Amino acid sequence: MYHSFQSKHSFNILSFALLTTYIFIFTTPVFAQLASVTPPVGGFRIDGNLIAGTPTANEGDWLEGTSGGYVFFNNGIAVNPTHSQLIRDAYHSNGDDAFTGSSFSQNPNLWKWTNASVANKTDIHNGMYHIASDGIQKWVIMGGDREVNTGTSYIDFEFYQGYMTKNSNGSFTSLSTDSTSLSTTNGRTVGDFVLSMEYTNGGAIATVHYYRWELSAGTYRYVEYNIPNGTSGSLAFGASNNTTISTPLGAFGLSTYQPYLFVEAAVNVDAILSAINPCDQISIKTVFIKTKASDAYNAALKDFITPIPVNFVFGRETFNYPSGPFYNCGTITPTFTGTGTFAANPSTGLSINATTGVINLSSSTPGTYKINYTYNAGGGCTMPAEDTIIITALPAPTKLSNQSLCSGATTSAVSFSSSLKPVSFSWTNDLTSIGLAGSGTGNIAEFTATNSGTSAVIGTITYTPNYTTNGATCAGPSDYFTITVKAKPSVASVRLTEPSICGPSTGTVTVTAPKGSGYLYNNNGGTWQTDTVFSGIAAGSGYHILVKDENGCIASDDTECKAATAATSQKNANPVATREVNTFTIKESKDKNVSIKVHPNPFQSRVQFEVNVQEAGHGTLEIFNMMGQKIKTVYAGQLNKGVQYFTTEMPAGTHQLIYTLQTENERMSGKMIRE
Ligand SMILES: [Ca+2]
Ligand SMILES: [Ca+2]
Ligand SMILES: [Ca+2]
């Protein structure tokens, strides 16, 4: 099943090397193999090239290309740092950290390092790895480089189950799996392994060696195993670039690799482990990338990249669920081999089919569950395989702001969103009088808010995200926002003091309602003022009074001069402007306390009124046309008891006129006719 390190140069290896050298010359592409892992999308092409989709479209690789997936962005940042890492080492520099006086065969706790330049064929600049599954088993994809292509180079990827660290004093510490004490099995843990890539300046094939740490002939040491053939192809294959290739990552100060400077390999570690021991299962804590002088067991170690702490498991997982994240919606189905039993821990809260492993997310409670798949691995080894599922509650939608505006104003358009996509939205509105339907789907366009009342109203819009995930559409938690529509203030009611012969020369408009703290008034679009009085208005210039309340809402109309006929058809809504509108009831004076006579009547231009009152008091004598429009005020002031005369010049034009005398208790009217 395996052979010791010393016998690894078997006939098969030698003949393979010769064969591959021969075939390379004629049919290089044959050896570019695809590891059927995901990610990246399209599998991982082992071809000595770093660019996805090159040369074959839609195949994945290390870096971004025109098609296919990738594991690093072209700036070197990992798409998923848990599974992939790119580590840079110093190069061509006395500051490089390098081994000194250390060999492959030694206990790592005896290794020494120093800062020194290393031979350029063993100098590493870029080291990278990617861990991915083919749906059943885990693979390691490795990549590394060197500065020159003279001869054969060796780059080891060593996987420790304990923590392995580089110390500042020039030593290393390799701990046991308890993470506390030094390893007692000669510096490593049984099952630790090395994947070693060997590449030359003459072939695109890179050879991959697998060494396992174990007790052999009384000593803990690495033992090389032949890598078996898998049922669906090779379990390990490597390649180096046989042409000059570009690397956006940069290498040794350049953006290209000359032939045979870059090497990559893919290894199905799970398959190799299970072929050696179906019960084997190891958790890796450290990856250590280093170069050595040869493939001899006591080969001198050369350059290295600072050990990388990691956390992944090989050999045990023989089933898995698709990549999350998962929400409590839909179902997920695992990929697995053989037959066994699925069980969840904790055993409540997760809806799982014990035979198929299908999880009904919709009827499961959000939480973290370990799923154990127990099956007979043969050889009496019943293996529990484990995967962990985290179910997250469907997220709440993005919180939206409340809106507050005056009746008649336009709302802000509402755009729903959520952190999880795809998502669609439905909503309800509990107050349609604000101008919005009672329910709907999708975003809400702007609309004119309405409120015909006298106080603010509030519509509550409740919106619900509907997520489509894992084959189902489920409603997530709702949220709501409000639209407050403030009422408009009443149209202004005003009292007028108008120019007349005997009165003031300019008019005054005094707002009588609405009034209160915060109210502002405006005439003819002028400055808003708190004062209810607009004075100094020129005769005949009119006015347009607007009211704004403490909420900043403006009345639906202004109050303006109205023709008298409008007195009965005020366009302003309630309350209407209160103008001094006169209602005419033309009748002869029958009152004994007041009498009025007009001389002459019919008149030409000058008219004299003879007024006789029995009680002194205030009185007003005015003239109106038949439309109810006041022509002039003849007198306004104190009336003495007895007879008094008022003479006035009548303006030209109107044929029939009405005069009225308003005393404190009585009102007299009469008709005047022009000759
Ligand atoms: Ca490649
Ligand atoms: Ca180094
Ligand atoms: Ca280096």
Image (tube, rainbow, N blue to C red):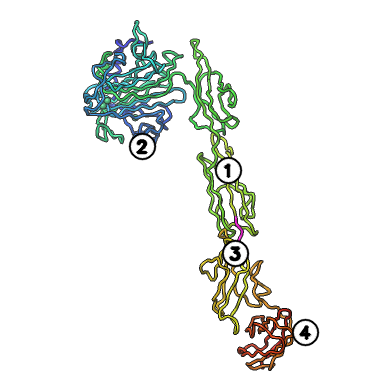
- Residue 591: give its label: 4
67 vs 149, nearest the viewer:
149
Residue bearing the label numbered 1: 479
447 vs 1, nearest the viewer:
447
Q: Nearer the viewer, mark 2 or mark 4?
A: 4
Q: Nearer the viewer, mark 2 or mark 1?
A: 1
Q: Can residue 110 be seen from the camera position used here?
A: yes
CA distance for labels 2 and 4: 108 Å
CA distance for labels 2 and 3: 64 Å
Residue 595 lies in the magenta-colored region: no
Name the N-terminal-most of marks 2 and 1.
Answer: 2
> What residue sits 49% from the left and 25% below the top?
320
For label 1, the SS is: strand
Name the N-terminal-most of marks 2 and 4.
Answer: 2
For label 3, the SS is: loop
> What x and y, as percent, mark residue 330?
57, 33
Q: Residue furthest top?
A: 218
343 vs 458, nearest the viewer:
458
Horizontal relation, residue 452 to residue 264: left or right: right
Magenta stretch: give its range: 485-491
Q: Nearer the viewer, mark 1 or mark 3?
A: 3
Q: Please state which amino acid type lies under the numbered disc 1.
A: Asp
> What residue sits 36% from the left and 36% below the top?
73
Residue bearing the label numbered 3: 555
> What x and y, as percent, mark residue 136?
46, 23
CA distance for labels 3 and 4: 45 Å
